[in-house]
Amino acid sequence: MRILLFGSSGFIGRHVRHALEDAGDLICPGRDRYDLINGELDDLKALVRVERPDAVVCCVGALTGTPGELMRANAMVAAKLLESAPDARLVRLGSAGEYGVVPEGHAVAEDDRLEPVGAYGVSHAAGTRLFALAGNTVSLRVFNPIGAGQPAENVLGRVAAQLRAGHTELSLGPLGAYRDFVDVRDVASLIRAVVVADDVPHPVYNAGSGRAVTVREAVEMLARVAGFTGPVREQGAGPQRSAAVNWIQADITRAAKDLGWAPAHDLSASIKSIWEDA
């Protein structure tokens, strides 16, 4: 098997690269060879002709930006892959943000109604829908990935950065929302399962832990691991892409049934990996 992986230097992509190392011939072009967001379509087609991949995995996208920037990074990248590699199995990262507001206590499943609350969720929902209209494509709706290499764009990454800097108190937005934190290694293992499977029955899978906890609980766990005993201040507003969503939890039954996948890391192990990496 020949596997073309875009975004192998990113937070999730680094773990995916490790998970796929022994799955076949792994090709990981950097942006110096091809920029998947800004590059020309003809150049992508040329790259695919040269590499002849059996599978293409996309770990490229954007969390923030203008609506146009988000659509280009998330939805248009999906369109470019569909046009450039129609004969390969295409795998992309979507987002739990596609679901929008979910009733508290409900574990959201892949066939539930999509009502994204911002441009970020809309851009991923568009990419997922484009993929679903084609054959041999899979989108993974990633919930809240955490682990080694945690970027500062996420709340636990911001906490780790403040702790590393020696802050005597933590200053964060509201922490009462419930989130499904999934270990980035488990996201990578699900991508591997999709890539190597003989048959993938569905075009969309949730990549979550199947458990919801408050962001406050996760922050407090990270503070304890770091030995921090100072105050945690909650002020201001959360990120626009998720501020309106007070509860989200993945139903991961489909991935278990179709692919035999289940998360292998609990929240405490994931939190520990963030701090050990820091």
Image: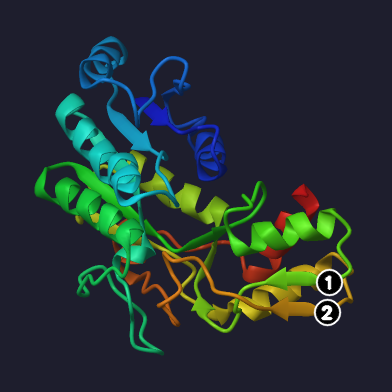
Q: Is residue 244 above or below residue 35?
A: below
Picture quarter with the N terminus: top left
Q: Is residue 187 above or below residue 5?
A: below
Q: CB under 8 Å between callouts 1 and 2?
A: yes
- Residue appearing at x 30%, y 64% in the figure: 98
Q: Position of residue 179 (x, y in %)?
A: 51, 75
- Judged from the image, the secondary structure of the residue bearing numbered disc 1 is loop
- Residue appearing at x 44%, y 20% in the figure: 29
Q: Which residue is mark 1?
A: 169
Q: Quadrant of residue 134?
A: top left
Instruction: Tell me which amino acid carries mark 1.
Output: Glu
Name the side, left or right, on which 156 lies relative to 241. Answer: right
Name the side, left or right, on which 140 lies relative to 227. Answer: left
Question: What is the number of callouts on the image?
Answer: 2
Name the side, left or right, on which 277 lies relative to 270. Answer: right
- Residue appearing at x 61%, y 79% in the figure: 175
Q: Which residue is mark 2?
A: 231
- Residue appearing at x 50%, y 39% in the figure: 13
Instruction: Tell me which amino acid carries mark 2.
Output: Pro
Say whether residue 200 is visible: no
